[in-house]
Image (cartoon, rainbow, N blue to C red):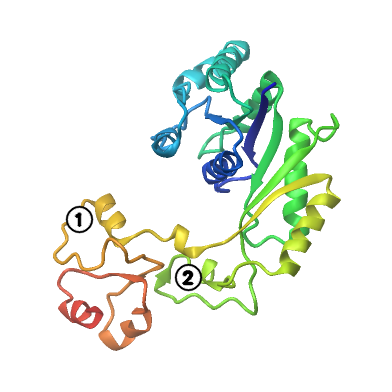
Amino acid sequence: MRTTVLVAPAGRGVGLTTACLGIVRALDREGIRVAFAKPVANREPDHTIPLLSLGAHFAIPPAVPRAEAEGLLADGDDQTLMERVVAIADQAGEDVDVLIVQGMHPEMGMVHSARVNALMLKALDAELVLVAAPSDQTAAEVAESIAIAARGYGALSDGRNVGAILNRVCDRKGVSPEPEADSFGPSSGGCGACAPEGLSETCLKEHQAALEAEGLRPIAIVPCNADLMSPRVKDIGDALRAQFLYTGDSVTRRVRDVAICAMTVPNAMKAMRPGTLVLTPGDRSDILLAAA
């Protein structure tokens, strides 16, 4: 009998797709027959299915276009949408042990993602796993926010086991560095303040205890890794459709911070650190020479 797991967000920007890909990979490594489905597409270009298809040995059915799903919701035709969702899940989950279903994540201006996820949970009779990213929250605060999200699904009140994945958990040691005035990015008082060696045993136990105290089942606690969020120079150039005058190590070098330099060279030197992308007007040859 197939087990269906709905993976849904407990907030915005939690890394929902990353969590789904990690679950699929972990189950596959254990020899479990696993499949993946994303019943409702994102509003913007959706890279989830093409990305997973690169390394998957199973077919992933196409999702319901977002505009079509929102049209059904606007007409009050939830049943037709859920019938489409169930059909996609049945197609993806044929002859597998576990089906991972990615829920909708809240996009800008969207207010119905949690409602649709709750409908999918009921229609698929699925187990629920919620994904959260603590940011600057304490262990107790993030566990409480996940529990609040779970109650919105009615899962805890129904006696269901609700799993929790904490993504990008920082174990900051000491005081976070003050961000530079002309600098912004992960290393500006954000993930650059994380302990580079990963999470301590104390941090792991603290988060695990907080989740269990709220009646949640800890599935994974993923440490923050700034390198995974740092794009390569080549990626930025391709996105900007920029012409490279000198490629250098653009394929391997990663950008961990961004600095806008339009001041004099002595004042700009504080921003010229390894891994920093320097933005400067094209006529500032002095800044270009200093950065080189």
- In primary-sequence order, the first of circles 2 and 1 is 2
> In the picture provided, is 143 more to the left or to the right than 227?
right
Q: Does residue 114 sit above or below 186 in this rendering?
A: above
Location of residue 93 by image quarter: top right
Q: Does residue 109 sit above or below 239 in this rendering?
A: above
**On the rendered image, what quadrant is the N terminus found in?**
top right
Residue at point 13%, 64% (across, down): 245
Residue at point 26%, 63% (across, down): 250
Location of residue 131 by image quarter: top right
Q: Position of residue 62 (x, y in %)?
A: 44, 23
Location of residue 271 by image quarter: bottom left
Q: Secondary structure at mark 1?
A: loop
| Residue marked by disc 1 | 242
| Residue marked by disc 2 | 187
Q: Position of residue 261 (x, y in %)?
A: 30, 74
**On the rendered image, what quadrant is the C terminus found in?**
bottom left
Q: Secondary structure at mark 2?
A: loop
> In the picture provided, is 248 more to the left or to the right than 225?
left
Of residues 199 and 213, the one nearer the viewer is: 199
Residue at point 58%, 46% (across, down): 12
User: Which residue is situated farthest in the bottom direction here?
Assistant: 266
Of residues 181 and 213, the one nearer the viewer is: 213
> Residue 204 has which mark?
none
Q: Does residue 64 sit above or below 143 in this rendering?
A: above
Count residues near mark 2 (Cα–Cα under 10 Å), then give few for <14, some for 14-19, many for 20+: many
> In the picture provided, is 169 more to the left or to the right than 261?
right
Query: How far apart are the alpha carbons under marks 2 and 1?
Result: 24 Å
